[in-house]
Image (cartoon, helix red, strand yellow):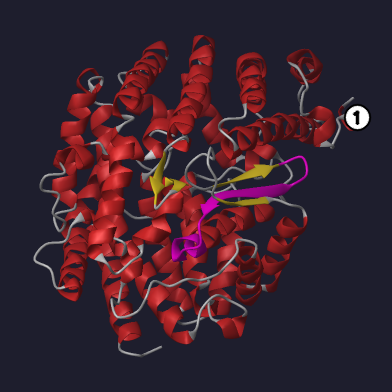
Amino acid sequence: MFNIIPKDPAIFMNWSWPQLNPYYQDLIARELDELNIDQFLRDWTRLIDLVSEIYARLSVSVTSDTMDEKAEKNYNRFLEQVYPESQAANQQLKEKLLVSGLEPDGFQNPLRKMRAEAEIYRSVNLPLLTEERKMGQEYNKIIGAQSVRWRGEELTLQQLRPHMQTQDRQSRERIWRSAAERQLADRQIINDLWIKQIATRIQLAENADLPNYRTYRWAQMTRLDYTPEDCLHFHRAIEAVAVPAATRLYQKHRNLLGVEKLRPWDMDLDLYPLHFPPISPYGQVDILPIKAENIFSNVAPILGEYFHVMREDNLLDLENRKGKAPGAYCTNFPVIKRPFIFMNAVGIATDVRTILHESGHAFHNFERFRLPYAQQRTPGLEFAEVASMGLELLASPYLTVENGGFYTQDDSVRFRVQHLERILAFWPYMAVVDAFQHWVYTHEESASNPANCDAKWYELWLRFIPGVDWNGLEAEVMTGWHRKQHIHRAPFYYVEYGLAQLGAVQVWKHSLKDQAETVENYRKALSLGGTATLPELYRTAGAKFAFDKKTLGKAVKLIERKIQELESGEK
């Protein structure tokens, strides 16, 4: 019966649970042995792929237009009627495989993850998980509706960003304050949503007989190669090494501006150096993917081919518009074995970094789809972000017009310097986000009061980002946690960026000596999917999975040295 599972999304997109359930029941009823395990896993993979693609396509629909009521209705129908049932059935299949004692080739790591998931599984949590996802979409709707009027035109806050890239400091301040005022207008509604979100997460942990949501989420995310204490150690390393580097960077920009103190509206690094206008990498949004493809073809011809497929198959939603959910992501459609990129391009240099980043995820999907079983394809997010951040750096030699890219030689140098400066500035911000979540989910009663969250965020901000003056803007800075979507939609998903950035810089270090060999090792690591542990994936890519001050210090030193070389005209 599995041979007749449709491959056309137009056919299966509206399948109900009664249409899917017979396939699950067929698998649940089978006897498992060494002779039929391959067919069992292949059939289970077809089913996982089908349900995953339905969910992915519905998610794309509601994020592409948060005001589309039909899309929201279909999404909620899936979450309420299909998602919980499929989760329960998949759990039965996981337990069936674990009880069998069978360990197919390439399944050692997937089985570790299954055991962790099985330990926290509770059927009573399925409706709560559904509600949690629906609240994430409610957050998207709030943010997606935010817009302001600027010079007679209604603009989303994302569309306002190009106007911020002006050398007129007073204009930057007016624009920044206009956006901040609009964001603060939603303060109460986000606080109200937060109270519901954190209550749901507390209940998930209690139902799983765990002391707090952090413990629950650690197992849910199958973080088996490191502990919460490792993250706290990483925060301290960032405080010791990256915070001073970022502070030196802020001092440099304060001197360039010729001001006594840096203010929030001075923080767009794309403005520098001040005697040049902001880099404008492309005109119309349809130019963005064309030039990106050229860059990827230079990194490795196969990567250009992958991206060309995405362009041809209409697997890119790049331009910002009103009602579109915030941020950027790469999802995948496993039935057709294709990735999909979503972002909010508005014609600024950040868009180039974003498409490089999300394309790294896309190429990871192309590589891992070659693995036969769905259970083998899911790497830790800590390495998935190496795929994206690594590509940002591996692509940096090919950004110029001569390579079919975006920039003149001079602008390419500026872009690369800005990119490296953003990495230095990012680690402290990442520490704020991650440390905030560790506090929230180990102090859940206190964190259920949004005012306490404001105070903790402010405290962490002052600890990790001391180089910027927020005097008189206390409400704006302390509600920064409102504007980090991961906190609301994907809790604890943020330290991955910091760890992966450290891995990516190590990969880049090798590329400075041998680009071709580094790209080969990078692709080899991507192709492993979830069949290897995080340390093994990093090692294959040419990096060390690390949290320590020494490793981070070497990365920071390399970045600062490379910035100096680029600014002095060295290659």
Q: Residue at x 53, y 13 (%)?
A: 127
Residue at the farthest bottom position? 569
Identify the image quadrant of the N terminus.
top right
Residue 319 in the image: above or below residue 53? below
Q: Residue at x 77, y 53 (%)?
A: 313
Quarter occupied by residue 310 = bottom right
Answer left or right for 318 relative to 20. Answer: left
Q: How many marks?
A: 1
User: Residue 28 placed where, x, y %?
Assistant: 74, 17
Identify the image quadrant of the C terminus.
bottom left
284 falls in the magenta region: no
Residue at the farthest front position? 152
Does any portion of residue 227 appear in the rendered image? no
Q: Amino acid at mark 1?
A: Ile
Q: Residue at x 12, y 68 (%)?
A: 259
Quarter occupied by residue 427 = bottom left
Residue 417 in the image: above or below residue 288? below
340 falls in the magenta region: yes
Q: Which residue is mark 1?
A: 4
Q: Nearer the viewer, residue 277 or 413?
A: 277
Does any portion of residue 490 appear in the rendered image? yes
> Where does the magenta region start and end?
334-353
